[in-house]
Image (cartoon, helix red, strand yellow):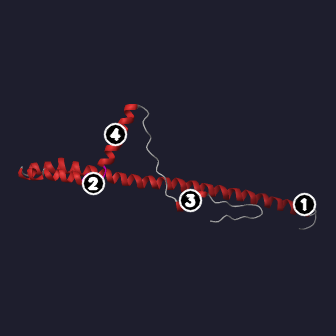
Amino acid sequence: MPATSSKIYTYSPHPHIEHRKKKAPTKEPAPKPKRGLARFNAWLAVKITSAVGTMWCAYAFTGLALVSLPGAVRGGTVMLVSWIAQTFLQLVLLSIIIVGQKVDSEASETRAIDTYKDAEAVLHEAMEIQHHLVQQDMVLQRLLESLGNSTTPGRAP
């Protein structure tokens, strides 16, 4: 919405309104631990999670699980069920679940940032409207006062 002006008020839209259309939200990094070993453990956990949480890792785990499939089939039903539950599901689905959580988390973070910025812009717009109304009230009050001063008692306006 372009800026409009009058003798009593100049409208200025929130900068985010146009900015939101042009730039994607930024992603905030996770806070880092302060102490040495905790910092290393956090760094290592992020690296491992990032590596395991890829579809390429899921493909690699699938290949690894399939290597043991012939032995599970030869072992009978109990071994096959055990292989499915303990090897395939836990190993392969682990990576796929992490990938899904990362995708969902990124989408959720984007929505949260967009919602915050939208709410900030709406608040700014509401404050601008309120300011405009105050300016109008002042003008109307001056008009009423000037009308009151221009009429003399006993005469109809």
Tag 4 or tag 3, which sits nearer the N-term? 3
Percent x, y of residue 108: 42, 54
Residue at x 85%, y 59% (from the top left corner): 145
Q: Look at the picture and state if 44 lies above or below 101.
A: above
**Is the Cβ of the residue at disc 3 closer than 8 Å to that at disc 4?**
no
Residue at numbered disc 1: 149
Local secondary structure at mark 1 = helix
Left or right, residue 112 beside residue 14: left
Percent x, y of residue 106: 41, 53
Front-most of 66 and 126?
Answer: 66
Residue at numbered disc 2: 56
Q: Within 10 angstroms of label 3, few (less than 14), some, or many (20 or more) residues?
A: few
Left or right, residue 95 beside residue 132: left
Local secondary structure at mark 4 = helix
Tag 1 or tag 2, which sits nearer the N-term? 2
Percent x, y of residue 93: 25, 51
Q: Within 10 angstroms of label 4, few (less than 14), some, or many (20 or more) residues?
A: few
Residue at x 50%, y 56% (from the top left corner): 114
The label shown at residue 19 is: 3
Local secondary structure at mark 2 = helix
Tag 2 or tag 4, which sits nearer the N-term? 4
Residue at numbered disc 4: 44
Q: Amino acid at mark 1?
A: Asn
Which residue range is magenta in the image?
Answer: 53-58
Real-space Cα separation, disc 2 to disc 1, in angstroms: 83 Å
Tag 1 or tag 4, which sits nearer the N-term? 4
